[in-house]
Structures are given as C-alpha cells and as structure tokens.
C-alpha cells in the first residue's frame, strides 16, 4: 500500500483500514464492492451516515487528525471521510492500542471493518454473536 505522508510525499508503506456503514446484513463481498467503487472514484450523493459521524468524533477525540501533528497514528491526515465510510492510513508502527480502539469503536457503532492489506472484512462483534 502507498499513502501520502503529512508533508505530501508518497510513503512506500502504510497500514490501511476503513470502516463502512452498510445496511444490516451486508456481506463481505458487498463491502469489497463498495471499496472498489470508492477506488474507482464513485461516491453517491448522500448525507453522512450517523454511525460514521459518531465513530469519527470518537476516534478523533483520542487521536486527532486536525491539525496533522507529530505523535498521532495517522500517516495521512485528515482522515478520508465519505457518506458511507472512513479511511484510515496508519503508520505501520502505530501502537496496538490504536488498532484495538478502532476495532472497538467500529463494533460500538455497528460498522464493518475492511483491512486493505489482505482484503479481510470484519463484521461488528454484535453481528458475529447473533
């Protein structure tokens, strides 16, 4: 994966995750299709999903993305936000706690988690238990 560092240069490696607000019952294949649409530049005209707004507020309360500053886990800041997802490009050496917080908040806000490194999709823990 490549990402754009805070100074605008391209970085050879970043750890990329995104959270997706798709309807209940969405499958991993539907998440991957939504990811591909985003990569192709297609973004529907709609209002941001309230689950994403709540997730963004929670994650940036602990790890601010504006203004970009040293010490945050974000290799690319501000975070890429859209109506149905938020993309997070993290420094590969970011603390494990950041990843745990992302996973926890994704579950709390009923968001699917997409790992760009291997294409894995993780449903919120509540969906797994159902």
Image (cartoon, rainbow, N blue to C red):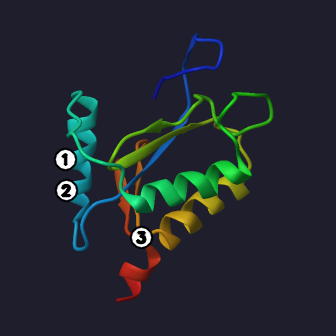
What mark, if any, has residue 30 been given in the picture?
2
Residue 16: x percent and y percent? 49, 40
Position of 65 compared to 20: left or right?
right
Q: Which residue is mark 1?
A: 33
Contact, mark 2 vs mark 1 (Cβ under 8 Å): yes
Label 1: which secondary element:
helix
Q: N-terminal of the two: label 3 or label 2?
A: 2
| Residue sitting farthest toward the front | 47
The residue beneath circle 3 is 110
Mark 3 burial class by Cα count in 10 Å: few <14, some 14-19, many 20+: many
Toward the bottom, the furthest residue is: 130
Categorize mark 1 by other alpha carbons within 10 Å: few (<14), some (14-19), many (20+).
few
The CA distance from mark 3 to mark 2 is 16 Å
Position in image of residue 24 (x %, y %)? 25, 73
Tell me the quarter of the image containing the C terminus. Answer: bottom left
Label of residue 15 in the image: none
Numbered disc total:
3
SS class, disc 2: helix
Asked if 105 appears above or below 4 in the picture, the reply is below
Q: Do labels 1 and 3 touch, CB within 8 Å?
A: no
Q: Earlier in the sequence, mark 1 or mark 3?
A: 1
Is 106 located above or below residue 18 in the figure? Answer: below
Name the image quarter holding the N terminus.
top left
State the CA–CA distance, disc 1 to disc 3: 19 Å
**In the image: residue 95, left or right of residue 25:** right
Asked whether, in this view, residue 127 is left or right of residue 4, the answer is left
Pinpoint residue 117: horizontal percent, then vertical percent.
43, 42
Residue drawn at x 65%, y 12% as measured from the top left: 7
Counting from the top left corner in percent of width and height, residue 18 is at 44, 47
The structure residue drawn at horizontal position 37% and vertical position 55%, both measured from the top left corner, is 120
SS for tag 3? loop
């Amino acid at each position: 994966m490549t990402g754009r560092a805070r100074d605008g240069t391209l970085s050879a490696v970043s750890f990329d995750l995104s959270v997706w607000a798709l309807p209940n019952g969405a499958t991993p294949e539907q998440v991957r299709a939504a990811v591909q649409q985003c990569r192709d530049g297609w973004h529907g005209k709609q209002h941001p999903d309230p689950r994403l707004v709540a997730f963004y507020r929670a994650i940036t309360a602990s790890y601010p993305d504006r203004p970009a500053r040293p010490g945050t886990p974000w290799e690319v800041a501000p975070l890429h936000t859209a109506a149905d997802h938020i993309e997070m490009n993290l420094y590969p050496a970011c603390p494990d706690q950041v990843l745990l917080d992302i996973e926890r908040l994704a579950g709390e806000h009923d968001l699917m988690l997409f790992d760009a490194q291997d294409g894995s999709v993780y449903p919120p823990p509540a969906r797994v238990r159902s």
